[in-house]
Amino acid sequence: MGVGELAMLLDRGEVLLLTGAGVSTDSGIPDYRGPDSVPRSPMTFQEFVATPEARQRYWARAFVGWSRMWIAEPNTTHRIVADLESAGRLTGLVTQNVDGLHSRAGHRDLVELHGAIDRVVCLDCHDLTPRPDLQDRLELLNPGWADREAVLAPDGDVIIEHTEDFTVAACERCDGRLKPDVVFFGESVPKPTVAHCFDLVDHAASLVVLGSSLHVMSGLRFVRAAAKRGIPVAIVNRGSTRGDPLATVRIDAGVAETLTATAQGSVGRTTA
């Protein structure tokens, strides 16, 4: 029943999609809050800016993580979503992911709510540079570091205990502090981005959430806005979400299998 209703929403068009980490797990990128996720506490923005040691610890891990995260390829979900855009079924796509896989799958009209890990921003002069350029500089400063054994984490870094001998690169323009162009925990999404997302909700016929627990308010607020407007809200995610009480269609299953099955019948445990 739930898959059939989701198929009707997608066929009807004017759909706003909101995606989370659950769409990228099939590409080998772990998520924070899925049923099999290992609990961890990512570095907050306040910690990052507080001390050079914190930034050293972050960049040592992120340097290794990038080389593993960036070999990930778009999966079935990313390709189906790009096809929906090409078919004119979407009014927009808002992703909470920073992995860039939607863009690499060919999606064009995309709001990266939490930024993108393939860009680097200077906190002091605000210069933006490509992440691969920084990776090359870090490789020269830390030869062999990327070959260390480590476990990939959801936000593009890895778990490494000892980072005291890692050399951090400074901004080439002002010698300032570099940070990936992503929204850290404890940091706010830029207000113009939030306003644009609310505008997308206002012009959509339905909101479909794919692979997000909606644990943080940055995504949940758009579900609340859609429900307040009275438009259908469909949520596809393994495990419960904070938006479940507002959903008109709720599918507890994997995203890729659900999208594939929209023309084939029900998948997993569904309610509506």
Image (cartoon, rainbow, N blue to C red):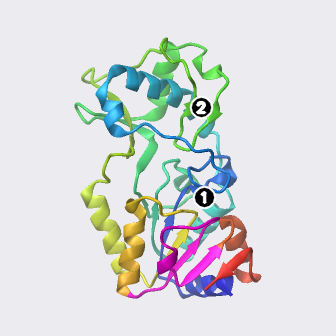
- Which residue is tagged 1? 22
Does residue 89 appear in this view? no
The quarter of the image holding the C terminus is: bottom right
Q: Secondary structure at mark 1?
A: helix
* Residue at image point 39% right, 79% down: 226
Q: Nearer the viewer, residue 253 or 210?
A: 253
Residue 239: image location, x then y, percent: 63, 65
Quadrant of the image containing the N terminus: bottom right
Measured Cα–Cα span from mark 1 to mark 2: 21 Å
Residue positioned 52% across, 28% down in the render:
61
Q: Quadrant of residue 66?
A: top right
Residue corresponding to mark 2? 67
Magenta stretch: give its range. 230-251
The image quadrant that residue 235 belongs to is bottom right
Judge the density around disc 2: few (<14), some (14-19), many (≥20) Cα neighbours within 10 Å.
Answer: some
Relative horizontal placement of residue 55, taking residue 79 as reference (left or right)? left
Q: Residues within 10 Å of mark 1 (few under 14, many from 20)?
A: many
Q: 177 or 172: which is nearer to us?
A: 177
Residue 189 vertical placement versus 151 (above, below): below
- In the picture, measured across the screen, residue 160 lies left or right of residue 203, that is right
In this picture, residue 47 sits left or right of residue 110: left
Closer to the chain start, of discs 1 and 2, is 1
Mark 2, secondary structure of its residue: helix
Image position, residue 37 (x, y; %)? 63, 49
Is residue 91 located in the magenta-colored stretch of the structure?
no
Rendering coords of residue 264 (x, y %): 77, 82
Up-down relation of residue 59 to residue 70 (above or below): above
* Any part of residue 54 in sight: yes
Callout 2 amino acid:
Ser
Q: Tell me where residue 194 appears, x and y as whole percent.
A: 31, 62
Q: Tell me the kind of residue under disc 1.
A: Gly
